Image: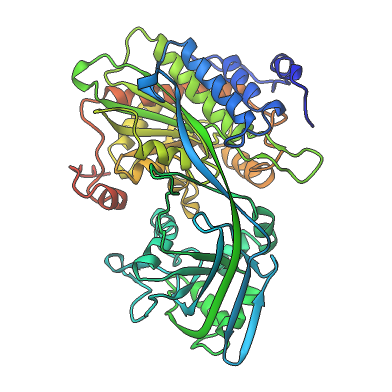
């Protein structure tokens, strides 16, 4: 339900508190609770990027930075905490239609039961027509043994691809390559992509669930010339096909879709590509709306002038998905995702600002916008740095810590890729918390939050969450299944505010340790991400177990 404006202040005082025993912690549970209670109130309407509710949230974060005496870094020349991100929203106008012809037949996909396609960021009215070629998983990395385009001519064509990546491929690598499929197809000359979910993908996310999650507008950040930033501008057509209907495209091909999907479902299965002998035409219309939404950026200076240009960056996304629930409660408050992460960052910043012995390096704090729309605010910050002649040398990101239980471990996604790993492990241990390995490697979580936009700029990064030891696994799964991106991610969840304070304490220790290190963080020589995004950087030798 909605609350009138006065309820915002009252809710901070009256919101129910989980009854917990008081563990020792250096941080104040009530302060964590206050941040989350304000940011997750109905009055902010779910903090959708570019909305009034998001603006209120951004002002709240800026006022917290101001109160602790942090230096404004959003626009240093103007003395502002706000780095305004220029954005453009593209919305579908009507239902896209895909018509496929060939082998004496014409097939029309014109409903969400058959076809899901979003808006196009660059063209308001589109008609894209081209022959179809099946290209397996669409992986074009011969250096990694992935050669899905070998022997295929896809120039000027639309490629039909399977979702995901071959079973058995490293999950983080597979997640990265999956997100890079459009660019790989474009480099081969393709003009469009049609994606068919694999059996495993369908089991994780049935078609009905895909339909529920589809249809929202897409946003892109705008470059200096006013055009949207696109990683694969040559890919003009994109859509996802229901496998039950997509089988018709393979009727006269070398293999049926059923046999292709069966092969892809085997460990190491890599279906070979072939021309489908059919032509597809995708028609869709989009409308555009320009808007801005700020990142909120502040800095706590370091103590050592010799490393004053080496910044450690903490990030957490401030936005959530807004007011569009389907039931009586329509507001997606985003209490855990990610008011909890912002609360953590604010309390760490406050502790560092009060600390009489500041760390050697300066620390940046960025509450970023539009993570939910594709890590847009973080990408804009990564490509438009606010550090002048300085540089960001490490990133620590907080996104959706589950604060409903007394955690005894944390997960630092990506820690195994760089010398940040041992620093994080030691600092966590000193705070009485164990560092655990990735408990969900199949999800490829390292590539799915804001730190990754800095990884793509070659900067070693970690993404921190509460761990799965003890009740952690059940708590995480319960949140994911029942509350993730739902209106129920609100203050009625059984928050353990002492756990929230402990998470802030652990991350204070971690960030402070990174900022105090004698040497800059370095990628390990055998890290795929270090080789991919920082090929010329000095690497470290991975320590022996």
Point 74% across, 20% down: residue: 5
Q: Quadrant of residue 437?
A: top left
Q: Quadrant of the N terminus?
A: top right
Side of 328 relative to 325 (left or right): right
Residue most toward the bottom?
Answer: 104
The spot of residue 139 in percent (x, y) is 39, 67
Rendering colour mode: rainbow
Point 66% across, 62% down: residue: 206
72 or 140: which is nearer to us?
72
Side of 90 relative to 298 (left or right): right
The spot of residue 201 in percent (x, y) is 57, 63
Q: Is residue 406 visible?
A: no
* On screen, residue 24 above or below 412: above
Side of 270 relative to 91 (left or right): left
Residue most toward the right?
Answer: 328
384 or 146: which is nearer to us?
384
* On screen, residue 124 above or below 310: below
190 or 486: which is nearer to us?
190
Q: Quadrant of the C terminus?
A: top left
* On screen, residue 262 above or below 418: below
Q: Quadrant of residue 315?
A: top left
Point 52% across, 27% down: residue: 342
225 or 49: which is nearer to us?
225
The spot of residue 237 in percent (x, y) is 51, 66
Q: Is residue 2 visible?
A: yes
The spot of residue 81 in percent (x, y) is 44, 22
């Amino acid at each position: 339900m909605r609350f009138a404006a006065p309820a915002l202040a009252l809710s901070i005082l009256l919101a129910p508190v989980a009854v917990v025993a008081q563990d020792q912690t250096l941080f104040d549970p009530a302060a964590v609770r206050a941040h989350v209670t304000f940011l997750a109130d109905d009055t902010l309407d779910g903090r959708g990027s570019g909305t009034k509710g998001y603006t209120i949230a951004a002002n709240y974060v800026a006022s917290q930075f101001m109160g602790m005496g942090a230096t404004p870094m959003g626009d240093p020349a103007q003395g502002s905490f706000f780095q305004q991100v220029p954005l453009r929203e593209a919305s579908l106008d009507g239902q896209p239609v895909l018509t496929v012809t060939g082998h004496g037949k014409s097939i029309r996909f014109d409903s969400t039961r058959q076809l899901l396609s979003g808006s196009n960021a660059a063209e308001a009215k589109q008609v894209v027509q081209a022959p179809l070629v099946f290209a397996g998983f669409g992986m074009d990395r011969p250096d990694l043994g992935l050669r899905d385009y070998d022997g295929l001519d896809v120039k000027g064509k639309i490629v039909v691809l399977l979702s995901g990546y071959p079973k058995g491929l490293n999950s983080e690598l597979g997640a990265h390559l999956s997100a890079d499929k459009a660019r790989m197809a474009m480099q081969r000359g393709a003009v469009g992509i049609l994606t068919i979910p694999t059996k495993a993908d369908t089991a994780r996310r049935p078609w009905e669930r895909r339909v529920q999650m589809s249809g929202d507008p897409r946003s892109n950040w705008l470059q200096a010339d006013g055009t949207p930033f696109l990683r694969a501008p040559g890919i003009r057509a994109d859509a996802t096909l229901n496998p039950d209907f997509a089988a018709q495209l393979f009727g006269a091909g070398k293999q049926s879709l059923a046999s292709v999907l069966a092969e892809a479902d085997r460990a190491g299965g890599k279906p070979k590509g072939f021309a489908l002998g059919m032509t597809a035409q995708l028609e869709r219309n989009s409308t555009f709306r320009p808007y801005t939404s700020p990142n909120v950026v502040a800095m706590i200076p370091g103590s050592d002038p010799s490393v004053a240009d080496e910044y450690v960056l903490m990030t957490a996304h401030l936005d959530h998905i807004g007011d569009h629930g389907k039931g009586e409660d329509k507001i997606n408050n985003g209490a855990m995702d990610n008011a909890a992460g912002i609360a953590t960052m604010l309390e760490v910043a406050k502790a560092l600002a009060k600390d009489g012995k500041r760390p050697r390096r300066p620390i940046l704090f960025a509450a970023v916008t539009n993570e939910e729309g594709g890590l847009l605010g973080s990408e804009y910050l990564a490509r438009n740095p606010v550090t002048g002649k300085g540089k960001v040398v490490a990133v620590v990101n907080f996104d959706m810590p589950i604060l409903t239980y007394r955690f005894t471990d944390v997960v630092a996604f990506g820690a195994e890729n760089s010398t940040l790993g041992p620093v994080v492990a030691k600092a966590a241990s000193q705070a009485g918390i164990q560092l655990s390995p990735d408990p969900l490697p199949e999800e490829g979580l390292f590539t799915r939050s804001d730190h990754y936009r800095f990884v793509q700029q070659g900067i070693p990064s970690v993404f921190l969450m509460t761990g799965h030891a003890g009740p952690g696994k059940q708590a995480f799964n319960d949140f994911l299944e029942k509350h993730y991106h739902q209106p129920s991610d609100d203050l009625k969840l059984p928050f353990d505010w002492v756990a929230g304070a402990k998470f802030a304490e652990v991350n204070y220790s971690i960030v402070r340790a990174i900022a105090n290190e004698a040497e800059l963080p370095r990628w390990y020589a055998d890290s795929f991400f270090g080789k991919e995004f920082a090929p010329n950087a000095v690497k470290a030798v991975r320590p022996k177990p």
